[in-house]
Amino acid sequence: MPLTVRPARTALALCAVALLTATAVGCGGAGGLQSAGPTPSAVGPARLWPELPPAKNDTQDDLAEAKPEVVPGIEVPDGDLHRVDALAVVQAEVRAHPDEASGQDAMPSEIAARILACEGKAGDKGCPVLSAYYRDLTGSGKDELIVGIDLGNRDDFGIGIRAYTQDDGRLVRIMSTTQPVISAELAGRDLILRSPAPFAGYELRDVWSWDGTARSMLPTRMEIVKAPGPSATPQRSAAPSPAESAGPTLSATPAATASPGATP
């Protein structure tokens, strides 16, 4: 019996030695750990002119224009914004804020008159209210309504962009901005607006995101970035081409093809 056990133990020992040897060789071979070189020392921010008193923050009232606003006369059936008429929404706001010269509801009087005269639906030819889009912007699991308004002269007035949610069947506006726009895009729950910068070769990029404290969409990130190409920032000297007059690009599925509850 001992003669049969010892060779087995010897074989096991040899296997263990071979395994350790292979492991040791593998650590230094291809695929092993490699040094990344010296790590630069972390340098903390250096405050400049610490003796200067900080400016007072008196901007608490600036969120007044960003506060949610109930649209009068518009109900949301079953809390589904896909069942709301986007044109009727903008018309209700125009009636509620006639002759607004400034603020979130301001628009040229001739555009307001054309909106009230529109028949059919948003996106119809000749109507300043553009096609509606849908996306869950608030994280509630339900789509919000996004509407664009062509204000005529895109270089001077740009377009109006408004977003709406619902609260117990009421339609609530959670975003309203007006600016010249190269493109409007939806990325996740963010609305990204690209606009011409005041200097050549660059553009402004504003990212609007839902803010639960303000209960509104706010520009949470504002950047100056290089334009992707020479044609990205249109010149403002000549009249817009027919393609440009059609409005900015919105990277999402329009209301005409979006199914209820689906996000583009």
Image (spheres, grey):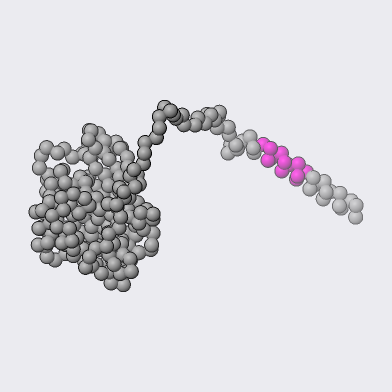
**Residue 134 in sight from this viewpoint:** no
- From the top left corner, tell me how far across and down residue 56 is, in percent: 36, 39
Q: In the shown orientation, is residue 238 left or right of residue 183?
A: left
Q: Which residues are magenta?
A: 14-25
> Toward which corner of the image does residue 79 lie, by quadrant?
bottom left
At horizontal 68% and vertical 37% (from top left) the residue drawn is 24
Q: Is residue 17 magenta?
A: yes
At horizontal 28% and vertical 54% (from top left) the residue drawn is 175
- Nearer to the camera, 61 or 196: 61
- From the top left corner, tell me how far across and down residue 34 is, in percent: 58, 34
At horizontal 29% and vertical 42% (from top left) the residue drawn is 205
- Nearer to the camera, 250 or 109: 109
Q: Is residue 126 above or below residue 200?
A: below
At horizontal 17% and vertical 52% (from top left) the residue drawn is 106
- Nearer to the camera, 38 or 32: 38
Q: Main SS type for the magenta part?
A: helix
Q: Is residue 62 above or below residue 260?
A: above
